Image: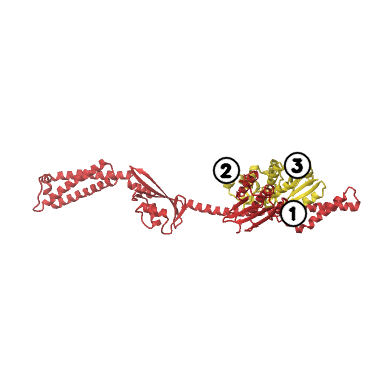
Amino acid sequence: MINVMIVEDQAMPRQLFEALINSDDKYNLLHSIKNADMADIYCEMSDIDLIIMDICTAMDSNGLEAAERIKAKYPHIKIIIVTSMPEFSYLNRARSIGVDSFWYKEAAEESILSVMDKTVAGESVYPDKTPTIAFGITDSSDFSERELLVLRELTSGDTNAQIAERLEMSQYTVRDYIQIMLEKTGFKSRTELAVKARECGIVILDKPKN
Amino acid sequence: MSSFLMQSPITQMNFLILLMMLMVIELVCFVACFMYRMKKRYFILCAAELCMLTVYCIIMIQGYRVSVPGGMLTAFEERILDLPYSIHIAIFGVLGVLTLVTFIWLHRWIRHHINMMSIKEGSDKLPMGLCCYYESGRTLLVNYTMGELCRIITGEALLNAHTFKAKLISGYLENGCTKIDSGSDVIISLPDGRAYTFSFRSYMLEKREIFEMVAVDVTDRFELIEHIEASNNEINRVNARLEDYGKTITDIIREREMLTAKVAIHDSLGKALIAAKRYVAFGDDAINIDALRALWVNSVALLSREAEYKDDNDSFDDLYDAAEIMGLKLSLKSEIKLENRTLKRMIMIGARECITNAAKHGKATELNILVKATKTGALVEYTNNGEAPTAEINMGGGLSSLERTINALGGQMEIVSTPEFVLRLSLDDMGVAL
C-alpha cells in the first residue's frame, strides 16, 4: 500500500484527488492538507511514500519550496507537482529540485492516477513544455525566457529601475523588453500587459508584497 | 602786424571763447582716457595737450584783463601777448587741430575696442542674470537682467551682492517669490511663473578674488520637472493599484481552478451516465459495474457537497493539526488582527521550525505563539514548555534557512537561549491595523 499525502489548498480539487486515491486500492490517503509549509512536519511523523503537491497553496506557501526541503531531508518520498499555472519557470525549477513528476491540472495528456502509477514505478513524468496559452494577439510560446522574467517582475508594480536592479540588467534593457512584449501582444500599456499576464497565469510572482 | 593786445575787446573775447571750447573738448578727451583706462602714452598725450591749452588760455585771459585800466602782466605774458595776432591764430590752429584729431581718434577707438561700457552693454543683452562683485559685496558689474531679478525678488536695487545672496539662500523673499528646495541649487520661482536657478563661484583676476553670481532661466525645465513629478505620482498610483490587483488575482485563479474541477466532475458524470445506459440497455459485460458504482457515488458526493465548500485558506487549521501530530498542544494568541498575509506566512514558517525542534530536541508538549504589536509593525514570539537549552543555541541548517526566509519576507529574526528558548520574528512596515 502506497501512503499518499495531498497538499492542495482548494477544497474541490483536493476532494477530487482524495476521491481518485480512495478509488484505487493501491493507494492509502494518509493526510490531506492545505498549507505546503506544514508538509515537512507530516513527512517527519508519518510514513509517506508519495506526495501530490500543488504549487500555490494556503497563505502564499510555495509547493516547490516545500518539495525542495522534503527532497533534501526525505529523498525516498516521491513528489508529483500539480498546478494549473502555465508559469514558465515551474517546469525547470521542479526538475532542478528533483521532483519526480509534474502534472498540469488543465492541460494534462494523461490522468493523475496514471502519472501516480508511473511515478511510483520509478518513472519520471514531465510534460514536454508549459502549456501554450493565448496572450493578446500572440501566445505564450512567443516569448523568450528573459522576456518572461521581465514580465514576471512587471506584475509586481515596480518601476523599471527596481526591476532592472533585481534582474541585474540595465533599465533601458528592461524598457526595451517591455516594448517588445507590448508590440507582440498588442496591449496598449505596461499595466494592461501586467494585468493580463497575471490573469492568464503566464507568470506568477512568488512573493506578493503587502 | 598788430599784437593780440591791440585787438578790439570783442575780437579778444571771441578768441578766448574758441580757446575755452577747445579746452573743454580736450578735457573730455582726458576724462575719457581715464574712464576707459587707456594706455599710459595716450593719457600723457592728452594731459600734455590739456596743459598747453590751459597755460595758453590763462595767458590770453590775462591779456584780455590788461585791456582793463590798471591791469599788470608778467614779462613772459607780455612777450607772448606782443606776438603778432597772426601767430596767435596759427597757435590756435595747431592746438585746435591737435585737439580735434585727439577727439576723433578717441571716438573711433572707443567705437572699435572692447571696454567697460561695451562689456556692460553686451552683458545687458544676455538672457541670464550676471553679477560680478568684490569680497566686500560691492558690485563690479550688474547686468540688466540681474538688476531686474533683484528688484523683483527683494524689492530693492542690487547694491550689495552679499546681501542679495543671503536673501536668496535664506528664502525670505518679497513680492510672492518662493525658494524651491532642490538640493544644493538655489531655485527661485517668480510670481509670473518664471523660475531661475542661482549659482555662485569665484575666480582670481589680476591677483584679486572676484565673485560671480549667475541666474539662469530654468522655467521650461522646472515645468518639465513638475510634469514629471505629476506623472510619477500617477504611475505610483497605478502601480499601487496593480499591487492590489496582484493580491486578488490569486483568489480569482483559485476560483478558476475550482471551476475546472467541477467541469472535470461533470465530465466524468457524463461518461458514467453513458456507461450506465449501455449496461442497463444492453447488459454490456465490458463495463465494470463496481467501478461504475464507485464513480457514481464519488461524483454525486462531490457535487452534493459543492455548496459546503469554503476555502478558508487563511486559517491556521493546518498549523494546529501539524502541532497535534507532533504531540504538541498549540496556543496562538494575538494582540492584533491577523490580516497581513506576510505576517501570517511568517507565523507559519516560524511555527514549522519550532514544532520540529520543540518536539525533537526540547521534548516539549506545549508550543505558545504570541503576536504583539510594535510601533512599526508586529513581533511574533515562540516559546515552549520543553527543556531549556544548556548553552547558546548554534544556528544550524534549519534556523539559518529560517532566518534567510524571514529576511526575504522583510522580517528580522532573534533567538534567545537563556533562561529559556525564545524565538522572535519581527516585521516592520506592514500596514497592519493595530
Q: Colour of chain B?
A: red
- Marks 1 and 2, how far apart at CA: 44 Å
Q: Chain of mark 3?
A: A
Q: Residue at x 81, y 50 (%)?
A: A22
Marks 2 and 3 belong to one chain? yes
Q: Give the foreground label among 1 and 2.
A: 1
Chain letter for yellow, please.
A
**Residue B153 at what x, y percent from top left?**
40, 56
Q: Are marks 1 and 2 in contact (CB under 8 Å)?
A: no
Q: Which residue matches tag 1?
A: A11
Q: Identify whether B97 is placed above or below A210.
A: above
Q: Which residue occupies the foreground of this view, B123 or B135?
A: B135
Q: Which residue matches tag 2?
A: A170
**Residue B19 at what x, y percent from top left?**
19, 48
Q: Give the foreground label among 3 and 1.
A: 1
Disc number at residue B202?
none
Q: Which residue matches tag 3?
A: A125
- Give, as a three-letter code, the residue at label 1: Ala
Label 2: element kind: loop
Q: Residue at x 85, y 50 (%)?
A: B291
Q: Give the foreground label among 2 and 3.
A: 3
Q: Is residue A82 visible?
A: no
- Give, as a three-letter code, the residue at label 3: Val
Image side of residue A83 versus residue B21, left or right: right
